[in-house]
Image: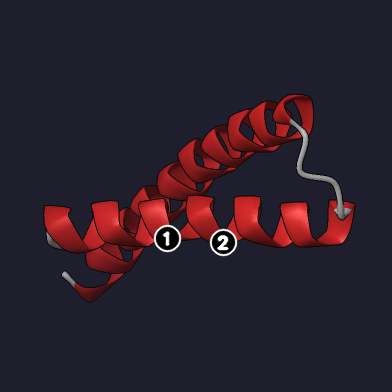
Amino acid sequence: MELKKFIAQVVMAMLLYVLISLILEQDFSTEILLRESRDGLIFGLVYGVVIWIWNRRKKDKTS
């Protein structure tokens, strides 16, 4: 997978996570915004690792 595409997917996942969390929380205070941003960053990192492993396994099976 291209690096730019990979990074774009991870960033979009993080932004969607934060946006959906804020909408569901219905509170936009600084504390909530920082907490959801931190959780979004963690989610993005985990998501990135999972995608990287998935593509690695897929590439190994096709080779």
> For the residue marked with disc 2, what is the amino acid?
Leu
Please say if 31 is above or below 5. above
Gap between marks 1 and 2, in whole Å?
6 Å
SS for dot 2: helix
Residue 19 location (% of width, % of height): 63, 58
Q: Which residue is mark 2?
A: 16
Q: Which quarter of the rendering shows the C terminus?
A: bottom left
**Mark 2 neighbour class, 10 Å CA radius: few under 14, some 14 to 19, many 20 or more:** some
Where residue 48 appears, as percent x and y from the top left, is 42, 47
Q: Which amino acid, by three-letter code, is at mark 1?
A: Met
For label 1, the SS is helix
Residue 12's disc is: 1
| Corner quadrant of residue 34 | top right
- Give whichever of 44, 35 is nearer the camera: 35
Against 48, residue 4 (above or below) is: below
Quadrant into which the N terminus falls: bottom left
The number of numbered badges drawn on the structure is 2
Q: Is residue 45 left or right of residue 17?
A: left
Crowd band around label 1 with a 10 angstrom C-alpha radius: few (<14), some (14–19), many (20+)? few
Q: Are marks 1 and 2 in contact (CB under 8 Å)?
A: yes
Position of 3 with respect to 48 (left or right) is: left
At x 63% / y 50%, what residue is drawn?
18
Viewer-proximal residue, 50 or 16? 16
Which residue is at a point 28% across and 59% down the rendered structure image? 8
